[in-house]
Amino acid sequence: MNKKEKTRNKILASAWELFLLQGYEHTSTREIATVANVAVGTVFSHFENKIDLLVAGMQQQIAVIINQAKQSDKQHSPRLKLRHYALPLFSFYCENTEFSKILLSDIIWRKAYFTEQVSAFKQLLFSDQAQYDEVKATVMMDCYFMTLITGLNEPEPNAEAMVRELTSKITLL
């Protein structure tokens, strides 16, 4: 890992730590720079703005969750695979509701930015199938995201309830 990557990772780790401690809104880029022991300008040379720091941190956490879930993935059908991955992901989103809502809002308005991640997840769901079904994969992702959005808008978001809702939707496929 080169110096630039190390600095980026240090900034990202510091930002995530502060977001968890203080919340997104109460964390400034100046504080992130201080904890990372870099200049504020260095933060902005790696990340365009604070939302990009949050998005990168969330993507990093989500990648870890997906990789952990892969270890126990014994499902073959795309629907069962989606359920398998949905529970740990929904749990993470529920535990980090503030960040999750910000991330979802960003996904809506910067779709191109997240296309690669969503596409990779759709491919993962069909990894044990002889043929990839783009329409079915897209509908499944729509069900996933709508369940996530409605679930996070509950007064007490509940991952298990969200998985039950998702299951009832995708059973129709």
Image (tube, grey):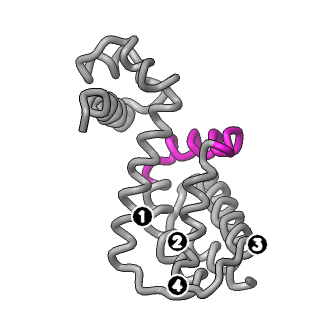
146 on left or right of 36:
right
Find disc 1 in the rendering and name its residue: 66
15 vs 168, nearest the viewer: 15
Tell which circle, 1 or 4, labels the residue nearer the N-terminal end. Answer: 1
Instruction: Please identify the dominant SS of the magenta region.
Output: helix
Label located before the other in sequence (2 or 3): 2
**10 Å crowding of disc 4: few (<14), some (14-19), many (20+):** some
Magenta region, residue range? 95-112
Q: Nearer the viewer, residue 150 or 82?
A: 82
Q: Which residue is mark 2?
A: 124
Disc 1 to disc 2, how far (Cα)? Answer: 10 Å
User: Marks 4/2: CA distance?
Assistant: 8 Å
Comparing labels 1 and 4, the label whose residue is closer to the camera: 4
When the figure is inspected, residue 122 is found, relative to residue 72, above or below; the finding is above
Callout 1: helix, strand or loop? helix
Residue 21 at least partly seen: no
Q: Of callouts 3 and 1, which one flags the residue occurring earlier in the amino acid sequence?
A: 1
132 in magenta: no
Looking at the image, residue 13 lies above or below residue 130: above
Q: How much space separates mark 3 and mark 1, taking CA atoms?
A: 22 Å
Q: Is residue 83 left or right of residue 144?
A: left
Q: Tag 4's secondary structure?
A: loop
Q: Amino acid at mark 1?
A: Ile
Give the residue type at disc 3: Val
> Label 1, label 4: how many angstroms apart (C-alpha)?
16 Å
